[in-house]
Amino acid sequence: MNRSSHMMIRAALAVFACLMGSFASADQSISKAAFGKTTEGTPVALYTLVNANGMKATITNYGAILVSLETPDRDGKMADVTLGYETVKEYIAETPYFGAIVGRYGNRIAKGKFSLDGKQYTLATNNDENHLHGGVKGFDKVVWQAKAILADKGPGLVLNYVSPDGEEGYPGNLSVTITYLLTDDNELRIHYEATTDKPTVCNITHHSYFNLAGQGSRDILGHELMIAAKRFTPVDKTLIPTGELRPVKGTPMDFTKPTAIGDRVNAKDEQIEFGGGYDHNWVLDNADGSMAVAARVYEPTSGRVMEVLTVEPGLQFYCGNFLDGTLTGKGGKVYKHRYGFCLETQHFPDSPNHPDFPTTTLRPGEKYCTTTVYKFSTR
């Protein structure tokens, strides 16, 4: 069989899968199930991807949310390592962006305002006086079009959404494609693409809360974290960057060597006090846009290791400071203070208002294109 015929067969299998709801190749599989309806009555689906090693990811087309991610510990025992809910109704009712794709602009824009080509734009303000994660109804609160695929590296899901001109105050019709791929190397790869018909800003990210001991099991303070960054962007008391790129050396922000998250999370430090703990952007050492390790996390009791690789210039580390025990997630687990952490690959917060930061401007004829990998192993 020639390569062309082989590719045609794989494409036909993918189409068949979308029509029938499930398919498998070797030990890989994809299945589709109902996941409830939005308040407007739009049906929502849940897709389950399984790689050849038995690692499993479930994704819903509501908010392009990663609902669960099951990975093995050092003894081969599987556990879900992401926080979330069991129904779409719960995600709609209240969620701190569990597992969601956030945009158009992940993170904060000061006072919900920015200028582009001499014109000022006013966005929704949903984080006190600032704009956060795309606004009142960002990408995490819309229903995406979804298509299951079986790629050479493993099962995947392609999600599409067109954000109309003026949505949440942003200019331009923005066509977005998110591809989740679960590889046989135990990687969850997330590829982002977007195009626009007017000059706009674009900074999309993924917002899973991880706990490598298992979701809802305990806090994450014993996780050992390394961030490949010698600088970070300090913030004011509203968590907007000051514009400075400050060295981490000698501060609680220094994760250049593996350090337990809890070691300095309550340090008497202005930046820690502003964030209520860690909620900051690190300036990654890899500045040439090539794929590189941005962070590595090790959980000693399970032996799980998660590496984050990206082409992005920044990484937001948030350690669940605002989780307070009022949210009950999957399996009836109560999510208490610092029961999950986020590692969000990104351009810097408030970049449209900081000309010296890497630009987030996207123009017609250009393509926003970026990839992040969450790679799992044990030791």
Image (cartoon, helix red, strand yellow):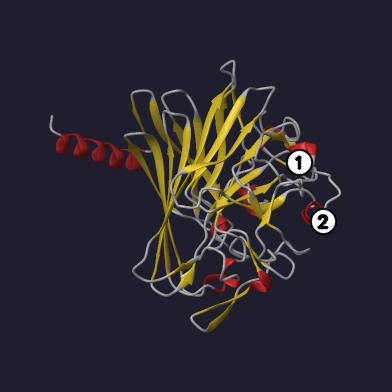
Amino acid carrying label 2: it is: Glu
Q: Nearer the viewer, residue 308 or 192?
A: 308
Q: Taking 289 as reference, is 345 left or right?
A: right
Secondary structure of the residue carrying numbered label 2: helix
Query: In the picture, residue 274 is in which quadrant?
Result: bottom right
Secondary structure state at the residue bearing disc 1: loop
Q: In the image, is 216 to the left or to the right of 87? A: right
Locate the C terminus and report the quarter of the image it occupies. Answer: top right
Q: At which x and y percent is residue 62?
A: 52, 51
- In this view, the residue in front, 379 or 126, is 379
- Proximity of marks 1 and 2: CB atoms separated by less than 8 Å: no
Q: Position of 122 compared to 193: left or right?
A: right
Asked whether residue 94 is in view, the answer is no
State the mark number for residue 338.
1
Specify the amino acid type for callout 1.
Arg
The residues tagged by marks 1 and 2 sit, at their Cα atoms, a distance apart of 20 Å
What x and y, as percent, mark residue 233?
Answer: 66, 58
How many numbered marks are there? 2
Q: Is residue 136 above or below residue 55?
A: below
The answer to which of 30 and 305 lies nearer the viewer is 305
Q: Based on the displayed image, in which of its 4 quarters is residue 218 positioned?
A: top right
Q: Position of residue 189 (x, y in %)?
A: 45, 41
- Residue at the spot of label 2: 270
Q: Quadrant of the N terminus?
A: top left
